[in-house]
Amino acid sequence: MSVVGLDERPIPGRVAHARWTVPAESLALLRDRVELAVAGTSDDVSDQLLVSALHEAVQAFLQHDGDPRGAARQVAPWFERIGERQARLGEELPALIQHFQKARQATQRGLRDALGVALVGESLVQLRQSLMAYLDLLLQHAARGMERAHKTQQMSLSACRDHLIDALFDHTDESSLNYLARSVGLADDAYVPVIAIGGPLPAALLNHPDVLRRGSDTEAAVPASWCDEAAVASKNAQVVMGPKVRLGALNEAIGLTRCAARLLSGRTVIDSRSVVPCSDLLALLLVDANPVLVDLLATKHLGPLEAMGESRRAKLGGTLLDWLERGLPANQLARELQLPTQTVHSRLKTCRSIYEGVLDDPVQRLELVIALRAKVPGWRSAAA
């Protein structure tokens, strides 16, 4: 099945309003009819995965006011698992399509009986169209899961594990990672990415059977249950410890840890510790994450400072950043910066005249901090 020409907008508000007026037992009746149509009438085996997926699908459709796209995105992992399960049972795509055709037919037949007079006329037509589009999208997710499972079935256990580790250290979506992990019997536990700078990670860590890594001896993912600074510290390298995350989010955590390692190896950040947690570098990681975005913020907010001479720009911009980040009164800030109180008062007065509206707006104030954080170190170096 394919979805052609779907309207980008959700169904109208009067249809969405039906979620407050349709009795829960009516929705349960419709869900039961679809379940019976797809799974058959046998009472010997209770298909808990199907029951759970249908329940989640109905809830998502209501929560998204009948918008098939938003609802399908929410329950995609459930239906990818349906596809994976059917592949393990030996089914091919035509059989999966047939299941969804039965679901479509049961929905069309049961909609009027389930809803009664809750919806009539054009609202009922629109709801039926949205439900059919919804089923098409759910089929696409199930087919994706089935295709992924078929590919994995052709791999050896070792090749599947290698594929998982490659996926963890590249950009792969969470549902794919979780399926690969299940395929090799790897629990969805928490891991901590670690990256060494200037040398390898400890050999004992690299050779541990529970540590995930590919060819490099400088990158690994360590089970959070036993990961601490002592376990990852290296005599020959500085090590960056990333955040603790579940397996499905590990590739994003690895990317963040790589950014932190770049900051340290490029001397953007000076830190003498042998093990540096990512959590200590969050502000700099935010600035480093998207240079284009930072440049846009600098263009938006820093024009008046950029037009000044190097020395004045560095002094005003630096004092403003210190004040914004520390949140101290001018006299206390002056003591911490070891500057005359009058000097700090004068600089802040100038900055307030430049950024009068910005400093009172929480969003623009945050933008200004990010822009200054990115530019002030360079201004200070140029002035020095």
Image: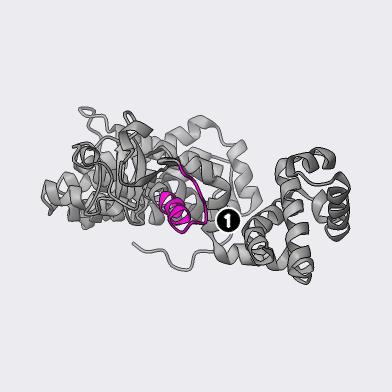
Residue at x-position 41% and y-position 37%: 244
Residue at x-position 40% and y-position 56%: 137
Which quarter of the rendering shows the C terminus?
bottom right
Which quarter of the rendering shows the N terminus?
bottom left
Q: Position of residue 284 (x, y in %)?
A: 56, 51
Q: Which of 25 and 61 is in front in this view?
A: 61
Residue at x-position 41% and y-position 63%: 3
Q: Residue furthest left?
A: 156
Q: Position of residue 371 (x, y in %)?
A: 67, 59
Q: Where is residue 235 in the image (x, y as percent from the top left)?
A: 30, 41
Asked whether, in this view, residue 86 is left or right of residue 253, the answer is left
Q: How crowded is mark 1: few (under 14 residues within 10 Å), some or many (20 or more)?
A: some
Residue at x-position 80% and y-position 55%: 358
Q: Give the range drawn in magenta.
A: 256-272
Asked whether, in this view, residue 105 is left or right of residue 183, the answer is right
Q: State yes or no: residue 58 in magenta.
A: no
**Residue 164 visible in the displayed image:** yes
Q: Which of 374 and 167 is in front in this view?
A: 374
| Residue type (three-letter) at the residue carrying disc 1 | Val
Q: State yes or no: residue 270 in magenta.
A: yes
Q: Position of residue 102 (x, y in %)?
A: 31, 49
**Residue 64 visible in the displayed image:** no
Asked whether, in this view, residue 60 is left or right of residue 161, the answer is right
Q: Residue 337 sits in which quadrant?
A: top right
Location of mark 1 (residue): 287
Q: Nearer the viewer, residue 163 or 29?
A: 163
Give the structural element (helix, strand or loop) at label 1: helix
Q: Residue 245 sits in which quadrant?
A: top left
Please count the marks in the image.
1
